[in-house]
Image (cartoon, grey):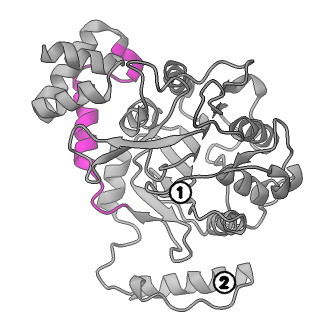
Amino acid sequence: MLRHLAKEKAREKLDERLGRPPSEPDSSHARSDDPPTTDPEFDQQAEEAIPAEVRMISGCHDTQTSADVSNVASFQLPDVAGAAGGALTSSLLKIIYNEEKPSCENLSFVDVFLRTRDVVKSKGFEQIPQLSSSRCIDVQQPFDLMTNKFGNEGTRYALLVGINYTTHRRGRLRGCHNDVLNVKRYIMDVGKIDPSNVTILMDDGNSTLPTRANIMQALDDLCQKCQPGDTGFVHYSGHGGRVKDETGEDPTGFNSTLVPLDFDKRGVGHILDKELYQHLVCSMPKGTALTCIMDCCHSGTVLDLPYNFVADGSHYEMEPVPDFPFLKLLKFRRALREAGVERLADLRDDETREKAVAAFTEHFGDRAMDGLARNFEGTRLGSGARRWKK
């Protein structure tokens, strides 16, 4: 009951802040068996499974598609590379960086996300932005994209990926390069990131190409650079997808994916959520912070984080993800540690890689190793699993 009253007060405060008429009470939040706002055991498992403080802004639910808008001028953003931009990136920047000036002072996370959704909706799109995190965030606190956890201490690094698929006959996008350049301007101006610490992958004819290998290497490099006290930032604008989960472990039956430029080449394919979890989420050292913006389809849980806030107008706080698979993730980290793997770069060593595959087999069984070999085909871990099975 107390939790329900707290939600209603938060709802009333939000309606007043946004100048909206009072909302009708939501009976779905009145259940007495709702999980507590904070659960010490859940929080402890989250910290053990994911060492860094990771947050992700995604453009839509896993089952939703994201939009490539044709005219960023309508969002009052600079048209630097065509006349298009991703709906999430364009809408978010309109709220927090309108006319290239910081414009979210005194706005909470809830304010920013709901206003972003209002902008998206006003342009005719139905996608619902989400915020997920490795730690429970008070979304009523002032919005901070880059996180000021370390103040002026430490170094900030960024990876920006924009894929328009210019070499493909089908599935071309128009706004992803524009997204990268707009976000770069924001993180340099507001986030105070040094230009020398910004890595850009784009298929614009001038930048390093956003191939699968280059994206994965850039993620590894980002995690290698970040040391305790540092902050990382990743922005991805391109296609997202869903593929069948070959391991049978995902309750939805599918993996969320990012689609690299060379996805259609033999042995390449999509970048799976499992890979992002391993190469990015789990590879960021303890004592670091990471913010990701995923402006693509099916991106709601692409980083598999344990806390979530959905800007659908009926949620007013971040909540634990029900039945989050901590046991599996903790077993995964334990298997890597037993094999002497502290960072994914350690898998470059043949002996270490074989130990990792053996540890995976012991913890997860042969069926999981079959799925590992298929899901990570073309990667060091997948190749090791394939050789082990032979």
Mark 2 Cα-neighbour bin, 10 Å: few <14, some 14–19, many ≥20: some
Relative horizontal placement of residue 199, taking residue 82 as reference (left or right) = left
Q: Quadrant of residue 78?
A: top right
- Coordinates of residue 334 in the picture (x, y in percent): 24, 33
The question of residue 326 being in magenta is answered with yes
Q: Which mark is residue 15?
A: 2
Q: What residue is at 57 percent from the left and 60 percent from the top? A: 129
Residue at left 48%, top 65%?
318
Mark 1 — residue?
A: 60
The amino acid on which the numbered mark 2 sits, given as a three-letter code, is: Asp
Residue 155 on image: x %, y %? 66, 31
CB atoms of marks 1 and 2 within 8 Å? no
Magenta residues span: 321-347
Closest to the observer, 331 or 377: 377
| Circle 1 crowding by C-alpha within 10 Å: few under 14, some 14–19, many from 20 | many
Position of residue 60 relative to residue 282, above or below, is below
Label 2, secondary structure: give it: helix
Determine the image quadrant of residue 156: top right
Instruction: Judge whether 79 appears above or below 349 on screen.
Output: below
Q: Earlier in the sequence, mark 1 or mark 2?
A: 2
Q: Is residue 204 magenta?
A: no
